[in-house]
Amino acid sequence: MAEMNDKKVRTTDLELKDRLVAVRRVTKVTKGGRHFSFAAIVVVGDEKGVVGYGLGKANEVTTAISKGIEDAKKNLVKVPLNKETIPHEQTAKFGGAQVFMKPAAPGTGVKAGGAMRAVFESVGIRDVLAKSKGSSNPHNLVKATVAALAQMRDAYTVAGLRGVPMNNVFNG
């Protein structure tokens, strides 16, 4: 989690687009009958390397979605991109959901399931191969995907951390 805190982004100067991942109807049974409310998970991103997710709960769907968007704007993460794909292979796990992603050649497209696809499109990734294993819970899939993207490093970051010139990163 410390890795994600280093890459926090401010919402100023960003044009964020939101994508609704899932809406669940939650029922609470009380003495007086059933009480329905809604939980919505939303992903926001600028399609240029910034992404965030949020959960909104309310008695109406539209209110739950707007609360999810506001929550997502508070949890933005910067992701390094290599043109329109990811820099390297990555796996991550959150709860019962495990995700695997690897870079793809230009023109491949986003080969990923629903919850992961929303995250990739929001961050601006156009070519990626991804697989989800374990749980298909959209909440945990979104969180695992964002955690994997937050752990990504580009070659310039690796060179800076190692204290070597850029041409030595690939040559060993």
Image (cartoon, grey):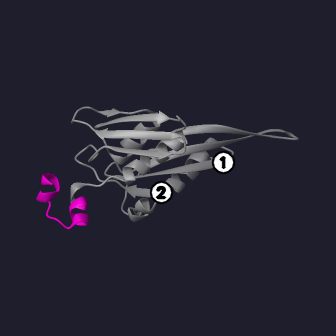
Q: Do the residues labelled 2 and 1 touch (CB within 8 Å)?
A: no
* Residues drawn in magenta: 157-172
Q: Position of residue 149 (x, y in %)?
A: 37, 49
| Residue pictured at 22% horizontal, 35% vertical | 105
**Regarding mark 1 in the picture, which secondary structure is present there?**
strand
User: Residue extending furthest right?
Assistant: 31
Specify the amino acid type for callout 2. Lys
Give the residue displayed 25% in from the left and 36% down from the top. Answer: 104
Q: Is residue 166 highlighted in magenta?
A: yes
Above/below status of 163 relative to 25: below
Q: Where is residue 67 in the image (x, y as percent from the top left)?
A: 58, 52
Q: Residue at x 36, y 47 (%)?
A: 123
Q: Mark 1 points at which residue?
A: 58
Q: Residue 17: tell me if it is visible.
A: no
In what element is the residue under mark 2?
helix
Local crowd at mark 2 within 10 Å, few (<14), some, or many (≥20)? many
- In the picture, measured across the screen, residue 162 lies left or right of residue 99, that is left
Residue 2, image x, y percentages: 44, 63
* Up-down relation of residue 91 to residue 135 (above or below): below
Amino acid beneath label 1: Ala
Disc tally is 2
* Position of 65 relative to 2 (above/below): above
- Front-lying residue, 147 or 172: 172
Magenta region's main secondary structure? helix
Cα gap from disc 2 to disc 1, whole angstroms: 18 Å
Q: Position of residue 6 (x, y in %)?
A: 39, 64
Asked if residue 54 shows in the view, the reply is: yes
The residue tagged 2 is 73
Q: Seen in the image, is 47 located left or right of residue 65? A: left
- Was residue 40 drawn as part of the magenta stretch in this picture? no
